[in-house]
Image (tube, rainbow, N blue to C red):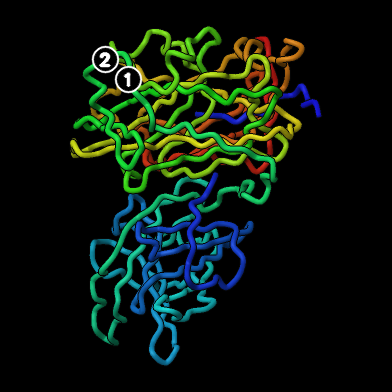
Amino acid sequence: MTPSREIALFLLSLSVVVGSSPVPTLQDYTHNVVLDGNEDYHMYWKFDDEKITFEVHVRTTGWVGFGFSPNGGMPGSDMVVGWVLDNGEVKFTDRHATAYSEPIIDDKHDYKLLLGKEEDDFTVLKFERLIDTCDDEHDWLLTSDTTRVIWAYHHDDPDDGVPMLRHSHRGTKSVRLLSVVGENESDLGPDVMTYDLLNNNVSDICSVVWVMDHIVIGGRNHFHLPATDTTYYCLGYKLPELDSKHHIIKYEPVIQTGNEAYVHHILVYQCRSDFNETQYHQTGHICYTANMPDDWYYCSSTVIAWAIGGEAFYFPEQAGLSLGADGDPTFVMLEMHYDNPDSLDNIYDSSGIRIYYTPRLREYDASVLNIGQDTSSRQIIPPGAEDYRNYGYCLGGITQQGFVDRVTGEATDVKVFAVALHTHLLGKAVGVTHVRDGKELGVLAKDDHYDFNFQEFSMLAEEVVLKPVCH
């Protein structure tokens, strides 16, 4: 099968954490996520144009709280609280919070309880609400933006007429409630192979000092994080040597258990063709320092991107990243961004990326387009500004150079099927708008509640065609 000359594109400017619950769900859901680190609080949901249906499974026989917050805290949040009595009766109330205290019961109840039960030490609550309840005072309007879900529970039920006991467990997690469902594991096929780009079995050949920054634990080589709040660590890897063209159809993070809070993002860059692959394969260096080889500065074309909060990324069934053909990457550099806010000196890591590739070619070759405004010292936010905007543009002439058919060498249309939005800690909102001939054609993606600690690709409901233009 010869792929079409049109290019499929995913834009870097969805997936969902899958968890298992001892109690079967009451119906099929399109999304699910584990909200806590101990897998004691499971959330399932699905939605249509008008309403969203939730089901929560919580390892408790006491009260359960669930809701949405502007920043992960109690004040300003919209929530429900429910519990199951010994006689099977279910108590369920629509509430809101104005302070760090027992939430207030709403005058207008916009959540509808569908079922509640206790089973195998779990409390199960199923309920629904409208996407827009028209209760602007107490309820959140649910959108495709990042939503900060808050959760809490206690092991005892409240007594009638007595204030609720303070939660014994609570937390918050950012999710995209109205995200499009992507591919799944069953779509991969029997001939799919995997290749790991992990931060293990790596040595630093350029500096005796950094040799000591790796330690063998359980037969695997781990990177020793420096006792600083932020570290960028770069790794070199040869890609599989193939005798024919293949397509990468999935990739996923492989995060060492216990290090989820330290690995913030992983970028995989293609290196130029004259790179010394033998010398630099499975070597590592602190990024962009004197110890990093000069050649590595030419590893700048993004192939894969993952950031905290994201899980596996599945390409749509008609597209895949080309591997093994002329001009395809043969050597890549991983850029590992580590956060170590407490400057601990005892963190070792062997995380990385796993790719899934197949000889069964799909219709389109996929690629990555980076657009936006680079961070620089010239970005000066005026003192006291409540709102400050940065703009980055992809000009028409650039599309003539970048949207090129690799067979004919001519400019061609591209189809965008997924977008990842990215900004740094000061960023509060971010978006990408499609413009042609001075006319706005629509917003590809936006997030007015951006969370730096929750970044992932979002599949578009419909592919968007970008055309190369001359101006």
Q: Is residue 69 left or right of residue 317?
A: left
Residue behind mark 1: 204
Q: Which mark is residue 213?
A: none
Helix, strand or loop at label 1? It is: loop
Q: Is residue 197 above or below residue 324?
A: below
Three-letter code, disc 2: Ser
Q: Position of residue 305 (x, y in %)?
A: 49, 31
Along the line of sight, the residue nearer the viewer: 81 or 389: 81
Who's the residue at 35% across and 65% down the image? Answer: 96
The amino acid at mark 1 is Asp
Q: Residues within 10 Å of mark 2 (few under 14, many from 20)?
A: few
Q: Residue 231's quadrant in the figure? A: top left
In the rendered image, the vertical position of residue 171 relative to residue 335, given as above or below: below
* Residue 317 image-quadrant placement: top right
Residue at the extreme front: 219
Which of the image's four quarters has the C terminus? top right
- Identified at 36% across, 28% down, the residue is 388
Decide: is 248 above or below 44: above
In the picture provided, is 176 more to the left or to the right than 260? Answer: right
- Residue at image position (43%, 26%) is 334
Within 10 angstroms of label 1, few (less than 14), some, or many (20 or more) residues? Answer: many
Q: Residue at x 42, y 75 (%)?
A: 122
Tell me if label 2 and label 1 are in contact, CB under 8 Å.
yes
Residue 211 versus residue 37: which sits nearer the camera?
211
Secondary element type, mark 2: loop
- Is residue 175 shown to the viewer in this render? yes
Task: State the CA–CA distance, disc 2 to disc 1.
Answer: 6 Å
Label annotation for residue 207:
2
Find residue 248 and report its image quarter: top right
Q: Nearer the viewer, residue 326 or 283?
A: 283
Q: Residue 456 location in percent, x, y?
A: 48, 40
